[in-house]
């Protein structure tokens, strides 16, 4: 419903729309009770908030546990099987019962002398097959880990072997005398925002592996599932992220601030904390004691801005020239968080081309 409809509903059935009187009142997590696939949930979170939830520690895991009522997607996933050259793997020749991800650490693939494939720990030392564009396959009998084999093939030939069809599989089968690495591998677990997994809370015997590449949380424990399953999900927002880890989205109160922020963000148009609220522009950080005289009113609009072109451009980005423009709040941009007390710490969170988020930390942000 619209804001006005929501106000009327709350006043009829309760007291009024919620008043948020402290940072603790701001929801870091958003629980969405609508069944979606993992990819659909990721898109929804990125369009409406920031991303699917990333869980960094036990405290955050407990927060989400208290929020959800059913199995719900979180941001943890891994890519499916792919070849060393980066291409997706369509042809497969798995042995019976494979891949089984025994011990939850079998992310690389060997071919046996019978021509079938199994997943193995990437740290095992085995012979391997390289690919060379001219002479095709090269069998190397020296035992190496999968990563060492990949490096050897790339330095001396083209890459570890990619097996695209049955004919190629039979050619390689005729060359090897022991189980040998081929170029197939599976990425390790990572979060939707692009960060690596440093904390986990798997349920017993999880993850199971196979084609279950996405993760739900249930009662605080994690389970891998087919990404095509439909579950509720948990999002988080950029504003809440900044408030949890620093102070807020960036407040820009002078031309000097603009210059120094522009040095940090480079060529990336980025969210700042300015937004439109009930006939006036205001900063996300509303602690009046922070602002000096006139600082809260400082603006650096680009020519013709704000123009509210789509009738709901209520959030502000800073362009590469340091000038500001109104944008739809649902758009995805990098953003700046900072420590508003002393302006000595900031974090630039950058969306790359595939909408993942990279974290670039900057210190002594203002002198």
Image (spheres, rainbow, N blue to C red):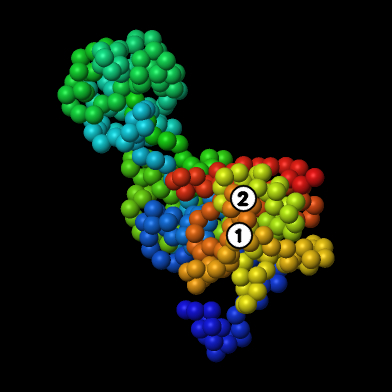
Nearest to N terminus: mark 1 or mark 2: 1
Q: Is residue 240 above or below residue 182?
A: below
Q: Position of residue 232 (x, y in %)?
A: 43, 62
Q: Which is more toward the observer, 50 or 244?
A: 50
Residue furthest top as drawn: 141
Residue 43, picture quadrant: bottom left
Q: Residue at x 44, y 22 (%)?
A: 147
Q: Which is more toward the observer, 302 or 210?
A: 302
Left or right: residue 5 compared with residue 162: right
Q: Residue at x 61, y 84 (%)?
A: 16
The secondary element bearing badge 1 is classed as loop
Structural crowding at the residue carrying mark 1, measured as other residues with C-alpha within 10 Å and reported as few (<14), some (14–19) or many (≥20) = some
The answer to the question of whether label 1 and label 2 lie on touching residues, with beta carbons closer than 8 A, is yes
Left or right: residue 5 compared with residue 363: left
Tell me, yes or no, if residue 220 can be seen here: no
Q: Which mark is residue 302?
A: 1
The secondary element bearing badge 2 is classed as loop
Q: Position of residue 61 (x, y in %)?
A: 57, 53
Left or right: residue 68 compared with residue 252: left
Left or right: residue 348 compared with residue 231: right
Residue indicated by mark 2:
321
Residue furthest front as drawn: 303
How far is disc 1 from disc 2 in space, using C-alphas?
9 Å
Residue furthest left as drawn: 167
Q: Residue at x 36, y 28 (%)?
A: 85
Q: Residue at x 40, y 18 (%)?
A: 154
Residue 165, picture quadrant: top left
């Amino acid at each position: 419903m619209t804001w006005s409809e929501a106000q009327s509903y709350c006043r009829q059935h309760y007291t009024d729309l919620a008043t948020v009187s402290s940072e603790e009142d701001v929801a870091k997590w958003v629980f969405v009770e609508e069944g979606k696939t993992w990819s659909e949930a990721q898109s929804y979170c990125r369009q409406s908030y920031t991303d699917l939830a990333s869980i960094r520690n036990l405290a955050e895991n407990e927060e989400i546990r208290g929020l959800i009522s059913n199995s719900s997607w979180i941001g943890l996933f891994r890519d499916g099987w792919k070849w060393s050259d980066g291409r997706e793997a369509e042809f497969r020749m798995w042995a019976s019962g494979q891949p089984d991800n025994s011990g939850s650490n079998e992310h690389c693939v060997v071919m046996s002398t019978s021509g079938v494939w199994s997943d193995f720990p990437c740290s095992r030392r085995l012979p391997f097959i390289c690919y060379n564009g001219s002479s095709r396959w090269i069998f190397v009998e020296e035992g190496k880990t999968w990563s060492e084999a990949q490096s050897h093939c790339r330095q001396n030939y083209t890459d570890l072997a990619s097996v695209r069809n049955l004919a190629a599989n039979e050619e390689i089968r005729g060359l090897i005398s022991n189980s040998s690495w081929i170029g197939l591998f599976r990425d390790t677990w990572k979060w939707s925002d692009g960060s690596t997994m440093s904390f986990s809370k798997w349920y017993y015997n999880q993850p199971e592996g196979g084609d279950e590449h996405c993760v739900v949380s249930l009662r605080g424990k994690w389970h891998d599932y087919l990404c095509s399953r439909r579950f509720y999900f948990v999002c988080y927002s950029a504003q809440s992220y900044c408030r949890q880890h620093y102070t807020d989205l960036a407040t820009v109160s002078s031309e000097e601030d603009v210059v120094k922020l522009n040095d940090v963000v480079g060529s990336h148009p980025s969210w700042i904390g300015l937004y439109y609220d009930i006939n006036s522009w205001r900063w996300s950080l509303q602690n009046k004691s922070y602002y000096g005289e006139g600082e809260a009113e400082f603006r650096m609009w680009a020519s013709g801005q704000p123009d509210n072109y789509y009738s709901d451009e209520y959030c502000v980005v800073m362009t590469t020239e340091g000038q500001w423009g109104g944008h739809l709040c649902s758009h995805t941009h990098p953003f700046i968080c900072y420590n508003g007390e002393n302006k000595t710490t900031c974090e630039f969170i950058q969306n790359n081309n595939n909408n993942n988020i990279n974290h670039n930390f900057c210190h002594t942000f203002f002198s």
